[in-house]
Amino acid sequence: MRTAAPAGTERVAPLAPAQHSLWFLDQLTGPSGEYILPFAHRLRGPLDIEALESALNALVARHAPLRTRIEQADGEPWQTVRRHRPFRLPQSDLSGDPGRVAPTVTDLALRPFDLAREDPLRPLLVRLGPQDHVLVCSLHHICCDGLSLALMGEELAVLYRAARNGRNPQEALPPLPVQYSDIVLARLGRAGSPEGRRALDRQREALAGAEPLRLPVDRPRPAIRTGRGDRVEVVVPAGTVRAVRAAARRHRVTPYMLLLTVFAMLLHRRSGSHDLCVGTPVSGRADREEEALIGLFTNTVVLRLDLSGRGLAELLSGVRSRALAAYQDGDVPFEHVVDALRPPRDLSRTPVFQVMFSFQDFEEDALALDGLHCTPWDIPVGSSKFDLELELGRDGDRLRGFLEYSTDLYEAATVRRLADDYLALLREVLDLSDSSTSEEPAR
């Protein structure tokens, strides 16, 4: 199924359910920085700026979502894929004013997008010195996800190397066999199939009657959720990580399931609820063709967890069974689940779940451009998509991440204590399972 493309565009296609949700929020609340994914790195060494510009152009030409705008026809939003037009890489020389570097990078990274009038990728190269730069690319979530950023870094390195060596970067990678809009069309068809409807029914039955999680908060919940937020760092030392993996093997669960179970135990202790829903992201990429694409594939599944078990083994078994059942239908769009459940309209909180847990059991490679020392540049966040979100990922032998929180509800000190309590409970659980919990100082 293909739609006719007006002049100046390659094609027009409907939005994926997750894209439609982001577009609807953009229309409801206005453009904001809540759903922006920054890709920022400091580049030290002899940077070839022309090669970097060529590499970025080749990347945008290769991946249609990076040049897709969301336009309306008869009140309905559509992906409008624009033909690639070579662009110059915007630059800002702040070598004489280092105090402006961090505010400039943060402003560019988190400045809201006009989804109908500009492409969802905004790059900037900031010069700190002759051989010292910051590359920041601001991307709206509607065009990409976390795995897309990792892919972007990998491909940018290949394209930069080709351009730096005098080759055409657009010939440095094999052509893509399919585009993102093709995947969207195919998935919309599957969602309406008999099997898709049965999978949706299973999700609806599993979540029917679930109540919002009511954790103690520092401030009254506002009538309308604003999305304002912040985060505190969470570091799980290497010794604890080894104990997590050993305990997970003994109980025949994944480290993700064990870490999630401990987080759910903490939520139970704080809320007093035995029945709680936690959201968790899944990659949404089913095959190699999809793994090669930049786009919004991530889906959210909701795990309804029963914390009435008396022992760790029983709790882990319950989390394992709930997780496997949810992953079986992990391709059912979360937006369709919400529509099927028809939860009471409540603008003060997110529907179905208010707390998210994510764990990446792999280490994301930093950008690696030939001849340069590249390190990630941290962008401070000013938003939170949920009441709380615990995000952990591999960082060498340890785990490092953040506990993101709504500043409408929580003080920073409260969330810091909550993060510390999670680490303490994790050590307590590992002690109960006779695991070694020797700690190492955080790096």
Image (spheres, rainbow, N blue to C red):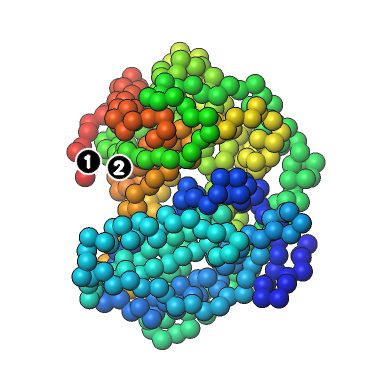
Look at mark 1 in the image and give the residue it sits on: 442
Look at label 2 and name its amino acid.
Answer: Arg
Q: What secondary structure is found at the residue carrying circle 1?
A: loop
Could you say which is closer to the camera, residue 373 or residue 49? 49
Q: Residue at x 58, y 64 (%)?
A: 117
- Where residue 135 sits: x, y (%)? 35, 66
- Residue 260 sits in quarter: top left
CB of mark 1 within 8 Å of CB of mark 2? yes
Q: Residues within 10 Å of mark 1 (few under 14, many from 20)?
A: few
Judged left or right of residue 438, residue 348 is right
Q: Is residue 348 visible?
A: yes
Q: Between tags 1 and 2, which lies in front? A: 1
Identify the image quadrant of the N terminus.
bottom right
Q: Residue at x 47, y 47 (%)?
A: 34
Count of numbered badges drawn on the protein: 2
Q: Single out the residue that lies furthest toward the right.
A: 194
Find residue 398 and name its label. 2
- Residue 256 sits in quarter: top left
Q: What secondary structure is found at the residue carrying circle 2?
A: strand
Look at label 1 and name its amino acid.
Answer: Ala
Distance from Cα at disc 1 to Cα at disc 2: 8 Å
Asked if residue 426 is positioned above or below residue 78 in the image, the reply reads: above
Judged left or right of residue 24, residue 36 is left
Of mark 1 and mark 2, the one earlier in the sequence is: 2
Asked if residue 190 is positioned above or below residue 407 in the image, the reply reads: below
Could you say which is closer to the camera, residue 298 or residue 340? 340
- Where residue 224 sits: x, y (%)? 53, 33
